[in-house]
Structure formats: C-alpha cells, structure tokens
Image: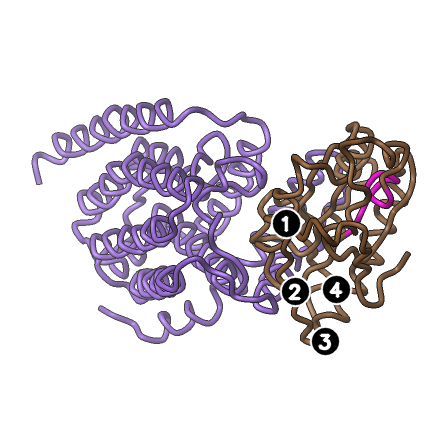
C-alpha cells in the first residue's frame, strides 16, 4: 500500500526535522565538551550561507551528481514513508550513496579520491547488516512492505533483538559518527576524513548537507520500524537511540577502516545471522 | 535576511609564523572562548571557507601557497591578517627572506596586530570581518584572481574599505 500523503509530508517536513536534529546534536555535543555551542538553528544558517556563496567546482558533473544524490535520497525517503517495499528502499539508498561517491570521483583531487574510496568501504561495511535487517523484519512480520511492518502488532524488537543491535552498530556508520566517521565527519574539518566533500563548495555543498538531513530522518524512521507495534515506545526508542549515538560519537576515537569493516561484518554474521536462524527454526521454518 | 554573518567558516594558514599567533587562534576554539557559538568553524578547506586567517609574513616559500588558497576560495571572501608579522612583517620585516606583510601579496581586509595577538582581539577581528563579508555580498563584489608579480612587490594592496 503506497500512501502518497506520507511521502509528501516526508519531502516537506524531513529537512526541517533533520536540520533541527543536527542542531540539537551540535548543542548537546558542545555541552558534553564543556562549551556553550551554537544555536539550535545553526545548521539552517550554514546551509543558507552555502546558498549565498559562489558555485566553484572543478567539474560541472559534480553539481549533477550532487543533485542526483539529493533526488535519490528524497525518492528513498518518500518510498519508505509512503510504506513501500523495504528492499527497494535499501537499494535506492545505496544508489543515492553511489552518486555521492561518483561526485567525489568526478574531481581530479587526491583528497576527494581518498574520501570516495573510504565512502565505498563504508557502504561495503554497512550493507550486509542493513539487508539482514530487512530480511529479519520479513521473517518477523511476513512482509517486506514498510506499511505492513509499521502497522504490524507483532513486537518486532522482541523477535529480532540481535538484528536491532547489529543495526545500531552500522547506524553509527550511516550517521557518520565516531568511531566510524572514516569518510566524512561532523568534527574533523581539517582532516582527510572530510575528503568526500573537499571539492564541493557553495550551493552543491549545501545540497549535500540537506541530503544528510533527509538521510537522518530516513534512518530514524528505520529504527522506529523495530517498535512499530507501539508508537509511543517507538518515538521514545528513536530519541534514546539518537542520544546514544551522540554519546558514542563524543566518547570514542576514530578507528581504521579495516576495523570498521571487519567488526561490522562480524556483527552482521554473528548477531544478525544467529538471530535470523533462531527465529527461523523456532517458528518452524517459515 | 542574510546567513553569511551567522555562519562564517574560516581557513587558517600559518605563513612563516612562530606559532605564537596560531596557538592563540586555536585557543579561540577551546571551551573558554568557544567561537563555535557564533557558528565559526575552522574548516581547513579553502573551498568551504569564507574567511582566510593568515598568521606570519610572506616569504619565498609560501607565496605560492597563499595565492593558491586565496584564489581557490569562493566569493564572497575576506582576508584577516592575524599578528604583527602578518600585518607588516613585524621584527622579521628586514630579513633577507621576508617580503613583508600579507598585503604585499593579496588584498587584506582586517589587520589584527599583536605579538602574539590575543584571542579576544582575534575574535574582534573576525567579527569586524563579518561586516565586510556582508558588505561584499550585498555589492556582489568579485574578488580579483591574484597572481604573483615580483616587480610589484613593494606595492601595498589594501582592500577596499578594509578596517585597519
């Protein structure tokens, strides 16, 4: 069942919510570091500023890829909130990420190249667990449709707690938080980890920021699916998960990509597959 | 309504500075001064930056780097020379390898003297720069593509309406 209204609501409201979440994130991070921190509206000021700047790019195709990145991210989120097929959502999300990588590769710059390669490694690291999460939800609710999963009365979280933990692990990668902020980060502006956006400036960088807001809302929506049986618990869980991510971000140092890759695949293989297998056999082989 | 003054991103370059001013600039980012509360971020990337903060004087080794960073920054942009060396060359003015202050090479908008410049005066300089940044935006000011002319070395390139 596709619900167009929810898709339109997502397209209009998600940037506002995502921007506010980013602003609150920066405020809480600042307080954790003993600073006052910027206004909660700071992310909106930043993006507004970027659209006032000159569009200086090495290669025109970079702008095209930045636009593709946001268009496919909006498509992914709209499909998700309209209650579409979860597998299609995941594939569209990957496609959006690939456009960011292509955008970084479009400029002949060593920093940009390193950033693009790190982004690819991150995609490889989180992808198995995200697909396992979709399969887990199918086994738990007998449907790949987001609308069915969200309205299902089955307590999904109790059936696939292992998959939820694994998803939380890769969520750190997706939200670009330490210790897995190896392709781009909210803090390390001078380091090579900012590589993927090195060659973007002005409005195209602004588009990438807005895309990140859409992505945050989409991912928090994904977290909600685990608690779809009770909206109140679901919203509470989403808030707690995000606060936990901020805490992890501020208390962990960045790891090398090898560890990020190995650990996220190991988590997917152990908690994800074991949880799935247990569920499969307990329910007598669906 | 403009957002430029609410979100100034800086790039900091150490041109033959003794590191005194650089430590003071980094002190601005610490919890005591916390310039991020004004939305100021030290980006380290000329393509993301609005304000070019230079410490130290121009010498033969860093001419190219200063020009490169300045020319890569998208408009509107301003240059803040932090410390007496960046303003005029300071005590190194007469050195055989020092060309002088940053304004020998690129247009400087704000001069922050001091040895080393204190964090308070650096923040004051950045805030002054915000006004100039906003003025440049409202006039659609296009910064010149600066090239190195060794024959014009002694010519001062003060920016239009720069605070001194």
Count the marks. Answer: 4
Q: Which residue is mark 2?
A: B144
Disc on the earlier residue, 3 or 4:
4
Q: Picture quarter containing residue A156?
A: top left
Outermost residue toward the front in this view: B151
Counting residues from the start of the chain, the first of labels 2 and 4 encountered is 4
Q: Nearer the viewer, mark 1 or mark 4?
A: 1
Which hue is chain A drawn in?
purple
The reply to whether dot 3 and dot 4 touch (C-beta < 8 Å) is no
Name which of mark 2 and mark 3 comes first in the sequence.
3
Circle 4: is it few (<14), some (14-19), or many (20+) Cα within 10 Å?
Answer: many
Q: Position of residue B158 (x, y in %)?
A: 82, 60
Local crowd size for mark 3, using a 10 Å CA cut-off: few (<14), some (14–19), many (≥20): few
- Gap between marks 3 and 1, in whole Å? 25 Å
Q: Is residue A194 left or right of residue A93?
A: right
Which of the chains bears the disc numbered 4? B
Q: Secondary structure at mark 3?
A: helix
Q: B146 and A173: which one is in front?
A: B146
Q: Nearest the camera: B44 or A129?
A: B44
**Which chain comes out brown in the rendered image?**
B
Q: Which mark is residue B67?
A: 1
Residue B120 at x, y = what percent? 89, 43
Tell me which residue sits at (43%, 45%) in the image.
A196
Residue assigned mark 4: B133
The mark found on residue B138 in the picture is 3
Q: Along the polypeptide, which appears first: circle 2 or circle 1?
A: 1
- Which region of the structure is painted magenta? B80-88
- The secondary structure type at the circle numbered 1 is helix
* Chain under numbered label 2: B
Q: Quadrant of the C terminus of chain A?
A: top left
């Amino acid at each position: 069942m596709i619900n167009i209204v929810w898709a339109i609501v997502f397209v209009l409201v998600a940037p506002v919510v995502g921007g506010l979440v980013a602003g609150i994130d920066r405020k809480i991070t600042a307080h954790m570091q003993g600073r006052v921190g910027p206004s909660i509206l700071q992310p909106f000021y930043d993006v507004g500023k970027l659209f006032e700047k000159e569009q200086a790019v090495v290669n025109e195709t970079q702008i095209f890829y930045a636009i593709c990145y946001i268009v496919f991210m909006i498509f992914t989120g709209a499909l998700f909130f309209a209650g579409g097929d979860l597998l299609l959502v995941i594939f569209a999300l990957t496609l959006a990420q690939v456009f960011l990588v292509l955008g970084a590769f479009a400029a002949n710059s060593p920093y940009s190249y390193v950033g693009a390669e790190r982004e690819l490694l991150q995609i490889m690291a989180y992808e198995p667990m995200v697909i396992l999460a979709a399969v887990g939800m199918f086994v738990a609710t007998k449907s790949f449709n987001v609308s069915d999963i969200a309205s299902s009365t089955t307590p999904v979280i109790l059936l696939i707690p292992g998959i939820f933990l694994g998803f939380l692990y890769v969520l750190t990668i997706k939200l670009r938080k330490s210790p897995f902020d190896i392709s781009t980060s909210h803090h390390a502006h001078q380091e090579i980890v900012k590589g993927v956006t090195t060659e973007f400036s002005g409005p195209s960088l602004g588009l990438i920021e807005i895309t990140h807001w859409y992505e945050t809302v989409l991912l928090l929506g994904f977290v909600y699916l685990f608690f779809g049986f009770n909206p109140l618990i679901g919203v509470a869980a989403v808030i707690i998960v995000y606060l936990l991510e901020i805490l992890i971000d501020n208390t962990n140092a960045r790891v090398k990509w090898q560890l990020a890759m190995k650990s996220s695949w190991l988590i997917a293989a152990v908690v994800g597959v074991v949880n799935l297998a247990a569920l499969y056999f307990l329910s007598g082989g669906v | 309504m403009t957002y430029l003054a609410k979100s100034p991103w800086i790039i900091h370059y150490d041109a033959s500075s003794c590191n005194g001013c650089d430590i003071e600039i980094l002190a601005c980012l610490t919890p005591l001064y916390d310039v991020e509360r004004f939305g100021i971020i030290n980006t380290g990337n000329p393509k993301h930056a609005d304000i070019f903060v230079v410490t130290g004087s121009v010498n033969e080794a860093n001419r190219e780097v200063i020009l490169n960073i300045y020319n890569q920054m998208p408009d509107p942009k301003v240059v803040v020379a932090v410390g007496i060396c960046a303003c005029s060359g300071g005590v190194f003015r007469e050195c055989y390898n020092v060309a002088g202050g940053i304004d020998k090479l690129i247009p400087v908008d704000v001069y922050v003297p001091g040895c080393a410049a204190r964090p308070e005066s650096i923040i004051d300089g950045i805030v002054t720069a915000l006004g100039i940044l906003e003025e440049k935006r409202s006039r659609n000011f296009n910064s010149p593509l600066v090239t190195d002319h060794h024959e014009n070395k002694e010519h001062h390139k003060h920016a239009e309406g720069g605070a001194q």
